[in-house]
Amino acid sequence: MSKSLAAAIGCASITVAAVASAEPPAGAAACSGCHPASTHVTSPVPRLAGRDGAAIVKAMQDFRSGTRAGTVMDRIAKGFTDEEMQAIAAWYATQK
Ligand code: HEC
């Protein structure tokens, strides 16, 4: 999977839609309804596509532990393990 993802990133001529659909990890579909998987989409929800993966994981962990308050993310974050958050964050970080 990482091989094809790297290939997709390396190919500058690939379309945005193709990159955005490049094998999202389990659970990512639960995020992309609110957080678009493309930086080209305008959304009132904070952008995750193209963001630093470590920052996404940190925010998720803070929501889960209650360190950071959210309207919905505190509840959503409780449904994910660290491994799932890392996989989803790494995927979002590669989305353009
Ligand atoms: C129902 C819509 C919804 C879903 C689904 C959702 N989010 Fe969020 N997310 C939000 C909103 C709204 C915020 C702003 C904080 C709040 O109000 O809870 C947010 C904030 C965040 C932030 C902080 C961003 C920042 O810039 O501060 C992260 C990271 C995040 N979400 C990750 C995720 C991940 C990963 C998933 C999937 C597991 C996910 N979200 C699913 C609506 C959603």
Image (cartoon, rainbow, N blue to C red):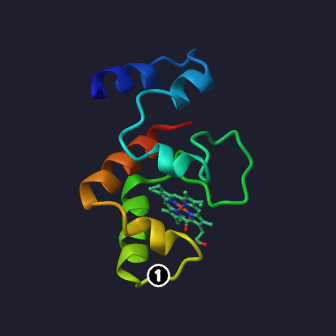
Would you call the spot at circle 1 few (<14 residues within 10 Å), some (14-19), or many (20 or more)?
few
Q: Residue at x 72, y 53 (%)?
A: 43
Image quarter in which the C terminus is found: top right
Query: Picture coordinates of residue 64 (x, y %)?
Result: 38, 74
Please tell me whether residue 22 is drawn above or below residue 90 in the rendered image: above
Query: Picture coordinates of residue 16 (x, y %)?
Result: 61, 26
From the viewer's perspective, is 83 left or right of 29?
left
Q: Residue at x 66, y 60 (%)?
A: 45
Q: Residue at x 40, y 51 (%)?
A: 89
Of residue 78 and residue 24, the one placed in the foreground of this image is 78
* Picture mark count: 1
Please tell me whether residue 51 is drawn above or below residue 3 in the rendered image: below
Of residue 28 and residue 41, the one placed in the foreground of this image is 28
Of residue 50 and residue 20, the one placed in the foreground of this image is 20
Image quarter in which the N terminus is found: top left
In the rendered image, which residue does mark 1 sit on?
68
Query: Picture coordinates of residue 85 (x, y %)?
Result: 34, 56
**What is the secondary structure assignment of the residue under circle 1?**
loop
Q: Residue furthest left?
A: 83
Amino acid at the residue labelled 1: Arg
Q: Residue at x 55, y 46 (%)?
A: 32
Query: Picture coordinates of residue 59 (x, y %)?
Result: 43, 69
Please tell me whether residue 77 is drawn above or below residue 34 in the rendered image: below
Query: Which quarter is ligand 1 in?
Result: bottom right
Please tell me whether residue 25 is drawn above or below residue 75 in the rendered image: above
